[in-house]
Image (spheres, grey):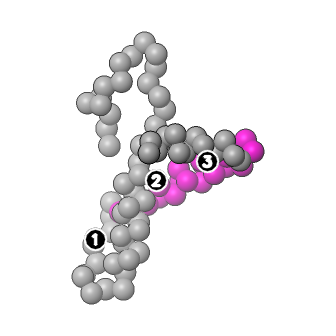
């Protein structure tokens, strides 16, 4: 299933104010996780922090989920996108 379609479907069920708040909070959560993942070394294999580290890095990898659509006069080239 397409992630964008799923996101639009879920957000269309919420009132506009709450949908906007949810998008902003989720965007900040992803950005925060990306910063933490950038500077946090992976824990040792037997550490109790492995689960937390896995969740944080998974959230950090969601960057770009809310990337705006390309302008109509510009081709959407995947090579132009930066992760």
The quarter of the image holding the N terminus is top left
SS of the residue at dot 3? helix
Q: Is residue 35 above or below residue 13?
A: below
Q: What's the residue at 24%, 82% (across, down)? A: 45
Q: Nearer the viewer, residue 28 or 8?
A: 8
Q: Determine if the magenta segment contains residue 16.
A: yes
What is the x, y in percent for residue 10? 61, 47
Query: Which residue is identified by label 2?
Result: 31
Q: Quadrant of residue 56?
A: bottom left
SS of the residue at dot 1? loop
Query: Which residue is identified by label 3?
Result: 10
Q: Quadrant of residue 34?
A: bottom left
Q: Earlier in the sequence, mark 2 or mark 1?
A: 2
Q: What's the residue at 39%, 16% (across, down)? A: 74
Please give the range of residues in magenta: 15-37
From the viewer's perspective, is 15 left or right of 49? Answer: right
Please rate how many residues cluster around mark 2, counting C-alpha atoms within 10 Å: few if below 14, some from 14 to 19, many from 20. some
- Between the residue at mark 2 and the residue at mark 3, the CA separation in whole angstroms equals 21 Å
Q: Nearer the viewer, residue 15 or 47?
A: 15
Q: Which mark lies nearer to you, 2 or 3?
A: 3
- Between the residue at mark 2 and the residue at mark 1, the CA separation in whole angstroms equals 17 Å
Q: Is residue 49 above or below residue 76?
A: below
Query: Which residue is identified by label 1?
Result: 41
What is the x, y in percent for residue 4? 49, 40
Q: Quadrant of residue 57?
A: bottom left
- Between the residue at mark 1 and the residue at mark 3, the CA separation in whole angstroms equals 34 Å
What is the x, y in percent for residue 54? 36, 70
What is the x, y in percent for residue 55? 41, 68
The answer to whether marks 1 and 3 mark residues whose Cβ atoms lie closer than 8 Å is: no
């Amino acid at each position: 299933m397409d992630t964008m379609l799923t996101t639009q479907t879920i957000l269309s069920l919420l009132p506009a104010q709450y949908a906007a708040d949810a998008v902003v909070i989720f965007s900040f959560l992803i950005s925060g996780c990306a910063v933490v993942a950038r500077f946090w070394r992976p824990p040792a294999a037997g550490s109790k922090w492995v689960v937390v580290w896995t969740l944080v890095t998974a959230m950090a990898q969601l960057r770009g989920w809310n990337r705006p659509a390309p302008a109509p006069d510009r081709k959407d080239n995947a090579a132009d996108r930066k992760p």
